[in-house]
Image (tube, rainbow, N blue to C red):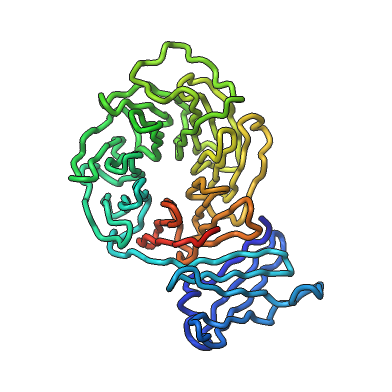
Amino acid sequence: MAAPLRIQSDWAQALRKDEGEAWLSCHPPGKPTLYGSLTCQGIGLDGIPEVTASEGFIVNEINKALPTSLLIIAEYLLGQTKSIHVSCPKENVSSKFLAPYATFSRIHTKSITCLDISSGGGLGVSSSADGSMKIWQASNGELRRVLEGHVFDVNCCRFFPSGLVVLSGGMDAQLKIWSAEDASCVVTFKGHKGGILDTAIVDRGKNVVSGSRDGTARLWDCGRSACLGVIADCGSSINGVAVGAADNSINLGSPEQMPSEREVGTESKMLLLAREDKKLQCLGLQSRQPLFLFIGSDAFNCCTFLSGFLLLAGTQDGNIYQLDVRSPRTPVQVIHRSGAPVMSLLSFRDGFIASQGDGSCFIVQQDLDYVIELTGADCDPVYKVATWEKQIYTCCRDGLVRRYQLSDL
């Protein structure tokens, strides 16, 4: 993933009118940034703008097989949704920029810190710096329920696999379970001594895991609203947690004590902890036995499993580490596109979606030789990404939820 391409955040609007212009740039590591512009030369009969790239690019080496300026292919995806595929032959990079299909501005009034979409795709849940947590219609952003009960900010919220129940964690050190149907809080878990920063759901949701500023990760029994144990106590804030099914080749170790019969679905699972002290910790969820401890370049903000042995973790200084649990000492690869903090990582099809503190949000797929960039956020951090089938939702510091529609990848 060499030189990232960037584009003006409102490029889709700018290029709608004749002679409309949008800037773009290419950022090769260790080299000066290349700047250029896109210009609309008119709108075709099919409603698609004819776009050309600026000739202002200095090309040090001319390859006759490729034009010396940026190469542009503009295309519509679905109705009003536009994507534009841009290449910079000089750096041999290519990106497809995707504009939002819809933008929801009336859910929250301030920065939106977390969101999730229900398993059926019908509902969204989000939490905001305005202190609120809300459930809304995923198709149009229409408000459905307000979930009230946390003191102070809600840091994280997610749907259970049923899509009818929500799990949230707050700065009040409480974990809560809510009915999405009537907004009632059905369970409150207490035990953490610091704010809860992330959660994970085990299997169908009889057990859940939380990570906190108090340095502990805990396993909870939802049916009895009780703590089943402190899985890890690492003395450093746990910013992100992920639970994944382990490949058969991985030895998860054996628990020292007989697990409670209230533990459901914890066997053959791994727990991943993204820690503030620059450490990424992986252990057997049921065995509580360590699998590895990896030291990164900066605080780890987020983590996710890609498969039964591959995982991703993102740091405060912009590194995305891909590790193999079977040989975790050396990363499979380290992706670095900018120094902005990696805010979220999500496994998606044959790859992943990442968002960063500079407003960039991008999709990497194994079989694509270009990156898909989700545009619209103008330098505001994109805190979280959620997907449902071909739809991708993002939440941002600018207070907006954006919904993107993908064509067939």
Q: Relative to the observer, which residue lies in front, 262 or 211? A: 262
Quarter where residue 294 is shown: top right
Quarter where residue 85 is shown: bottom right
**Res. 212 visible in picture:** no
- Residue 62, horizontal then vertical, whole percent: 81, 74
Residue lying at 34% horizontally and 27% vertically, measured from the top left:
220
Q: Relative to the observer, which residue lies in front, 211 or 98? A: 98
What is the count of numbered marks?
A: 0
Quadrant showing the C terminus:
bottom right
- Residue 302, horizontal then vertical, whole percent: 49, 43
Please state if 327 lies on the left or on the right of 353 as rendered: right
Quarter where residue 395 is shown: bottom left
Is residue 235 depicted above or below 257 in this figure? below
Please state if 198 lies on the left or on the right of 278 as rendered: left
Quadrant showing the N terminus:
bottom right
Is residue 408 depicted above or below 35 in this figure? above
Residue lying at 24% horizontally and 33% vertically, measured from the top left:
188
**Res. 38 visible in picture:** yes
Q: Relative to the observer, which residue lies in front, 76 or 219? A: 76
Q: Relative to the observer, which residue lies in front, 76 or 360? A: 76
Residue lying at 31% horizontally and 53% vertically, measured from the top left:
122
Is residue 100 depicted above or below 232 in this figure? below
- Residue 249, horizontal then vertical, whole percent: 61, 25
- Residue 180, horizontal then vertical, whole percent: 24, 45
Residue lying at 65% horizontally and 46% vertically, measured from the top left:
334
Residue extending farthest top? 257
